[in-house]
Amino acid sequence: MRTKFTAVSAACEQCGTLSMREGHLNHGSVSEDSYHPQADERERRAKLHLQTNSAGTEEEEVEEDAEDENAEVAEDAAEGEDDAEEDDAEEEEEDAGDVEEGGGNCGSGSEKRKRVHSDEDIDLHYVPALKKHHRSWKAFDAYLKKYSDRTSTKMVVNETLNVSLRNRRIKAQNQYKGRPPAEIPQVPESVDPFQRVYICTHGWKVRSRSVEKRPTQRTFYTGCEARFLAQVYERLNGTWGIKIKRDFYGHNHHVSDEIFQSHPGIRQVPMGSPVMRDVELMVDCGGKASRIYDYIRSNTAHRVTMTDVSNMISRIKKGGSELSDEDQVAELLFNFNMSAEGNVSTVNENARGQTAVVSISSELMRKHYSRFPELLLVDCTHKTNRNRYQLCTLMVMDQFGNGQPVQHSVIERNADWHMVKVLEHFQAVNEWERTQVVMVDKDLNEVEVLKRMLPHCRILLCHFHVIKWLKKAVRDDKKYGTYPSEVLKQIDFCVHNMVYSKTESELNDNAQELKTLTLRNEREELWSYFDKNWMACQEMWVDAFRLQLPHFRNNTNNRLESFFGKLKVDLDRSFSMVQCLSAILNFQRRKEDANNMKTLIPGSTRNANYGEEMNQLLGRQTEWVADVFFEEYQFATNPDTMQHYTFIETDTMVNVVRGDRRHHVDRASSLCDCEFSATLKLPCRHVILYRKHAGMLLAIPYASIQSRVRWLRAGSPDAVLPTVDMPLRVFTRRDEVARKKQMTEKDKFKRAQNVLGRISSELTELQFYSWLMTSVDPLLEERCRAGGDTVCGETEAYAVAKELMKTWPHTQLPGFDFPIEWSNIYCAREETWYNDLVIEAFTTTLSAKYGKNKTIFLAQVQLPDTNEGNRVPEATRAALEMSTEDYIFLPINLNSSHWACIVVDNVKGALMCYDSVDKRTHLKLLQTIANEIISTTLTGFAQTTMHSPTQKDSDSCGLFVCLFFWKRLWKEAGSDYTHMGLRLRRWEVLHAIIEFSKGQGA
């Protein structure tokens, strides 16, 4: 299907059809595989008619094969064969019809599209022509799909002309002006669209949207001019069909099945394909992209790429299930709470109503803390979900020397408030006062929160992270200058010695050496930084200050870092929140099962390198305990050791002396004040030496070790846990739940109004009560000093608080002509958005007090909004026309997250537009709505824009709208927009609503 020719295009003067004048043309016979344009127009039409009949005959066979799949399409093909008899007659009327129908190119004119070729040789690859007539658009689409598969060409819609636009253009023509509708050739709306222009996919010009970040771009455009026009026409029998016009089938690129199968729309697997169920199952099971690729290539004809497979996996994961991510999280937490009596989970939300902290503690986690409470490891890790929430884990060290998590918390960010909520959950479910040491990273920013929430605990810094940080800090050339490599090595050596100093004097000597090295060449920046930030907190990172603490030789967070490394094998940064929590719980279950296998099965262990006494110890304690104790035992049982020690006995203590070193051994507990005994809570070498000196039968005090439950191999499986009453309210599933797209990290579980209504009402109650009771006192004091009378007294304020708590949350507030519950006014607290019920309730109180206003809520708008001219419903326009009040308040919600308003001033004949953040896009939208109201309803009114007052926070837009309304009615409403002033305004709004309701109820 190749031909070379040189031709000049010209348009026929009579009919305007395109003709080809012969230049240098290689003639050949016309067949289905070779199509040659001829010079003479009549011969070209005859050839085209023969080719059309040939294509129609061949396509008839294809449609007969598809009869079982689409009976309607088969019927269309049969009727299309009958329509072929009408071709000659309709060809003669085609050009005249073009004039009547507004032209072939989207109604742009009556002249045919011209195709101009250069005088150079062009390689064209011709394909068989389309069948001319089709019964309907549905039949044509099915035919075009089979035609594309048969000819290996991909034709796409370039332009579309709908029926309504075509009819309007016909009516606008001079020849039809003033005529009755029956004389105007109209097309019924049922056959929409009127026409489509199809072009080859390689003739589509792609507009570059590059910003020069990636200057090299790949495009499929080759300038291919293959095209045709599919247009609605009226048949001789009065029905409507589809005909093909202005068709040209010469492609300037190779046409082959290999190229066709490589097009993105062809090679990719459609979502409705049967193989997609298998792919979704493989994705749910954690199948790799390479395995899914191999499965698709082996079982389908789709020639997908690895990029296609990766995008497919991403779409499946983001597609979600029939429940939203929040609902799935709630269901997961509910099932977790119900799976064991001791399982506890809590959900905390921030002031905006967004889910901020999700904490979980299983029954076995709490038992582990109950047995090993002395040391607590705290750390956070990233990249566990696509919302960029962090995972904060609290861990203890068990009898095997391994880390055991006691709490997992998914937090929005590593801030003070979030850490407070994490620790509040920890304190609520555990006897937290038993913790003595907390180990954190240098990177953990909330050390002050830990000190405040755990005041009796010593906060220690991980040695590994301290050394790593200081090595990095001394090499910061921009801050502290450049030091020679030899000096840097000496500084590293000094830092290491300072960290592991055993005495304070040793620390001071190493610090003095570091000072000498850093002050070379009169540079003081590095030492000033070190002295100010590190020497002031020596007790947190120097070994000398932790020798008497029960850290069990655990000076790093390596156990917790190792846990994160293993956990992240099952986690991915693309996970949704429910996938993240599920992976954490599944990993925790595997870890708990492995721990149960080691501790619950009876048995004992023996070591061939140990003596009888050590093997007796190993039979009851773990390998880790026996290993660390063996060094002490070997030293104490060495025959040459005893001669270096002397023993001074008292009533309860024994002083073990060697040279200038003296240690005190407690006879009752068999514990010593040396580093080994103090940090491990085990008998040391001094205890064994004393027992040998006293002539005791056994050198190892087994009773002392066995009395400490933490070191026993098998712990009690029936440990008593503190009772916890922390109910979690389950998200209620709606009757019809649409398939939702998962939340992205940009919105981070937005939709605060919906989320807050689903989170635990108990938690919300506590937050509301806390805010109310803590806010009333300073407001009362402020009012008393100012001499105001808005707040009537302390007794009344506390009475309001008690009334709120007594009726919370579902009791109706009387006096309003719309349903409003006590729970709906939760947003009266600080840093919370007002909902529409509070705004309407407050404007109702204004109407009752002043009698000059009316409130009408405008429809919510999502920006950008394209519904220009139809934003004000007819009912709103009618209400505006009939209103007699001085002011009409029109609140409007933008993007479900911001309140703005329009005020109609009937006294001055003006509309005031107000946005508390004074954003240009918001004001432009309000001005457009105001102009629409003026043009349709309030003719002659003026439109003004108000630019003050402006809010400085992100939560008070609804409050500012209420205050703007109030200011129209009472000029003394107040102009204090400070933090304290806005708190007072919130109380006044709440107070006005409650007082109005009480008055109406009475």
Image (cartoon, rainbow, N blue to C red):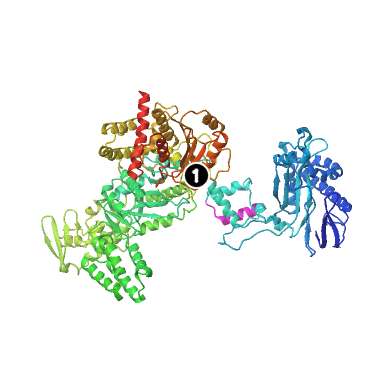
Residue 240 found in image quarter: top right
Image location of residue 393, percent across then percent down:
37, 52
Residue 726 visible in rendering: no
Image location of residue 463, percent across then percent down:
32, 62
Q: Nearer the viewer, residue 785 or 518?
A: 785
495 in magenta:
no
Image location of residue 499, percent across then percent down:
28, 65
Q: Magenta segment, which residues?
A: 286-301
Answer with left or right where residue 114 lies relative to residue 617.
right
Q: Is residue 188 above or below residue 473?
A: above
Q: Is residue 1002 above or below residue 617?
A: above
Image location of residue 276, percent across then percent down:
60, 47
Answer with left or right where residue 224 lies relative to residue 451.
right
Q: What quarter of the picture does the N terminus occupy? A: bottom right
Residue sitting farthest toward the left:
650
Reading the image, the residue beneath label 1 is 923
Q: Is residue 601 above or below residue 896?
A: below
**Which residue is rendered at x = 29% and y = 38% of the image?**
776
Answer with left or right where residue 340 lies relative to residue 705.
right
Residue 855 visible in rendering: yes
**Which residue is rendered at x = 68% and y = 58% of the image?**
221
287 in magenta:
yes
Mark 1 closeness class: few <14, some 14–19, many ≥20 residues within 10 Å: many
Query: Mark 1 belongs to which amino acid?
Result: Leu
